[in-house]
Amino acid sequence: MISAIYNFALTTGANRVIRGARIEHVCGDPTLSPEKDYAFGMRIVTTALETLTIAVPGPTLFDPMAPGKESAHAP
Amino acid sequence: MRLELGTFPVKDIVFGGATRYDAGQLTVDRDAVLAAVRQDPRIATAELEIARPGESVRIWPVRDVIEPRIKVEGPGVCYPGICGRDIATVGEGRTHRLAGMGVVEVSSVNWHDAGGDFVETYLDMSGHYGEMYPYAKLVNLCLVVEPDTTLGEEIKNYAVHKAALTVADQLGEAVRSLTPPEREVFERTAVDPSLPKVVYIWCVHSPQAMSGSPTAFCTTTYGLTQLTPPWYLHPNEILDGALTGPYRTAFAMSWTVANNPLFLDLYRRHGKDWNFLGVISLRTEWTTQTEKQLMANQTAKLAKQLGAQGAVVTWDAGGNEFIEVIRGIQACERLGIKTVFLTSEDDATDGAPTMLEPLPEADAIVSTGFFKNTTLGVPDAPAVELRGSTIGLHAGADAALPTAGLLPPPWRYDDHYGFNSLSCIE
């Protein structure tokens, strides 16, 4: 589950929670240029897809922008 | 800070040659009041109509209901900061109010063009929908107003809301120099130090996230509608309209904010049952987890710094705003401040919790009722006379609908401040 209010997603019981941007634009940021916005959104969505391959013991938060998840396209 | 509130009860409103108040009857010079409204070139059409309790009248679309209040002594103006009004700090001196009446702002102008925030409220002056709201018990002067259609949405909103305040000001002027039949002095006097210290955490919606604009029409603190960190307001500032409606729920009008029974009771029992510290007003609908938690933390910190031992908490919205409200309660409790939460509940039909995020710290909750707009059914099609537009946007239908005849139930009738007598059945 990609969510801007990720704590709520965790307490609700979603096993894989991806930290999104904001409620009104969960997978993007309209303040960025179109290219950077695309890269930002791709990073969130790609992280979400990757987590499907990871076994989790229970509700777990994944932060696409966390250290170790850096990419050349990070805004 | 001392404020004397002079009350002029209005039993009836009639149109007549000069605007004046006499023994409960308010005579309104329709032409003069409308001339003042029409001075604004942004206003295309404006009419005044009277709607009395019990009449078979439907008012639609209701954007706001305003109680006329006017500053007689002391700095500033009532309803400060709204639509260009003075922002001098209010709450001192003397204020006169016309009680038992409302200026109803009736216009098809929607709040903003970003979608979602439809003006929803229609007001029936009789029938069971009317009974749910305090406004159907008021003598209402309806300003049916439409702006120049070529203007942008924010300018339209500014123009029609300013027009409603202009009407309220014109009525208020009629009682400026009169002796009020009822007077009440409000002051946070020094009290017995053993009394518990209580703060009111009054959460109000901000339209900024939904509209994308920091100046979209909505509830205001000194005219500001944007998302702001918590404010500390002296209760006298509230009495002078420093905090106003409306939001799109029926109970979040400016009139209900000005007459909030919970707030008035907290203030009137200052020095008797507790030490009322004042109001912390938190703007809600922050849009990240971090912002919501930050506002919750800062609200609790401010309450602690004020010395609060107890806090009463209300809010005026639904949905994700609940997070900063309930987290604020949690943060207060963790700092040792006991909280009571006055709230409506959500629809639990499909097994969802009646509160979006139930937290164990919120263990003292007063419910004002179950919020499900279909419970009450479709209202009868009354032989209504209409005050307002022949079509109106309806949030429940997400569309413009004809105003006469059958309508969906009101979208939101949850009571934020304890006006009505709806309750829950376990």
Image: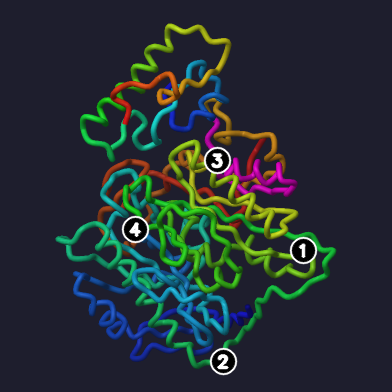
The residue wearing badge 2 is: B179
Q: Earlier in the sequence, mark 1 or mark 4?
A: 4
Instruction: Please tell me if label 2 and label 4 are on a single chain.
Output: yes
Name the kind of residue labelled 3 in the image: Gln
Mark 2, other Cα within 10 Å: few <14 / some 14–19 / many ≥20: few
Disc 4 element: loop
x, y percentage for residue B245?
45, 61
Q: Nearer the viewer, mark 2 or mark 4?
A: 4
Marks 2 and 3, how far apart in space? Answer: 49 Å
Going 66% across and 80% down the picture, which residue do you hit?
A: B185
| Residue B293 image label | 3
Along the viewing direction, whichever of A47 and B185 lies nearer the viewer: A47
The residue wearing badge 4 is: B215
Q: Which quadrant does the N terminus of chain B fall into?
A: bottom right
Name the kind of residue labelled 2 in the image: Thr
The residue wearing badge 1 is: B274
Name the kind of residue labelled 1 in the image: Trp
x, y percentage for residue B136?
48, 63
- Image marks 3 and 4: residues in contact by CB distance under 8 Å: no
x, y percentage for residue B172?
44, 82
Marks 3 and 4, how far apart in space? Answer: 24 Å
Q: Which quadrant does the C terminus of chain B fall into?
A: top right
Q: Nearer the viewer, mark 1 or mark 4?
A: 4
